[in-house]
Amino acid sequence: MTDAYSLPPADKTWQNHVILNEFFGPLDPAPRRTPMRELISTLLSHRTTHRDEELAYDRMLEAFGDWEGVLAAPTAELAHAIRTTRWPDTQAPRIQEILRRIKAEHGSFTLDFLADWPVEKGLEWLTDMPGIGLKTASLVLLFNYQKPVLPVDTHVHRVAQRVGMIGPKVSVEKAHQLLLGQLPKDALVLLNFHKHNYWHGQHICFFTKPDCPNCPLKGFCNYYLEHYGPATAEALAATPEHWDVARGELQH
């Protein structure tokens, strides 16, 4: 049993994918949002709850109608419309600069040119935008264009470190490439890995007081081994096989 805790990181990463795919269920690859909404909503989501991000996005479009209206809006009024975000006075001019550059370079408010671009070119172009980091760029390319990239947010990063898929000192930025290198370059696998670990970090592997007894990864997780010792047969048998929706809604 203890041999599982010493698995190489790549093996732990694959076991994580297999187990969480069963635990949460495989995902439909259909995009959850349009590309422009994915880009702008993710920008608005920084250090902001999902509810407040959605509220800011809806208020912005209600106030200004469309992307042309958002671009033409007085920046102070745009900041007021997205006031439920963490830094509205910073995000408002960023949004307008992003819209300005997209329209100037491509003639309209579209990101569909990314579908034909190589991954590295798309990442470079997106991360050159103000406020757009590797996570946001990867989300757009993976969710909307099925590119083989892996977004790593704080939840995914925390789970990966605790389980032992990456080292304890590996940064979020570095984790993008390390974890990507341990998985098949298959967009559906990468989508499921990202979302499942995101949910796992949200609902089980909390920053403080993680719910280790109900964790399906306990059989090879370094954090569990350190705090509880090797998982017993009884502990493994008591682990839920599937996510119980009564414990919380999974954000798609």
Image (cartoon, rainbow, N blue to C red):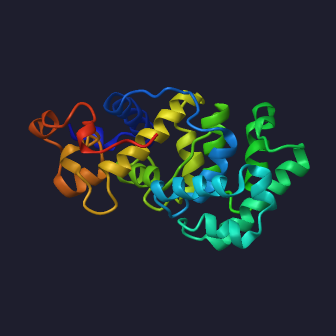
Q: How many marks?
A: 0
Of residue 227 and residue 39, the one placed in the foreground of this image is 39
| Quarter of the rendering occupied by the N terminus | top left
Which residue does the image show at 52% across and 43% down from the upper left? 179
- From this viewpoint, is residue 134 visible? no
Q: Residue at x 47, y 33 (%)?
A: 192
233 is higher (above) or lower (below) than 63: above
Please tell me whether residue 204 is drawn above or below residue 88 in the rendered image.
Answer: above
Relative image position of residue 247 (x, y in whole percent) = 24, 44
The answer to whether residue 167 is left or right of residue 83 is: left
- From the viewer's perspective, tell me whether residue 185 is left or right of residue 229: right
Q: Please name whichever residue, 153 or 163, is drawn nearer the observer in this view of the structure.
A: 153
Considering only vertical position in the picture, is 56 above or below 120? below
Image-based side of 70 in relation to 13, left or right: right
Q: Residue shown at 34%/61% (left/top)?
A: 207
Q: Position of residue 197 (x, y in %)?
A: 41, 43
Q: Position of residue 195 (x, y in %)?
A: 46, 40
- Residue 184 placement: quadrant: top right
Q: Nearer the viewer, residue 61 or 152?
A: 61
Residue 80 in sight here: yes
Image x and y of residue 132, in percent: 68, 57
The residue drawn where x is 23% and y is 31% is 241
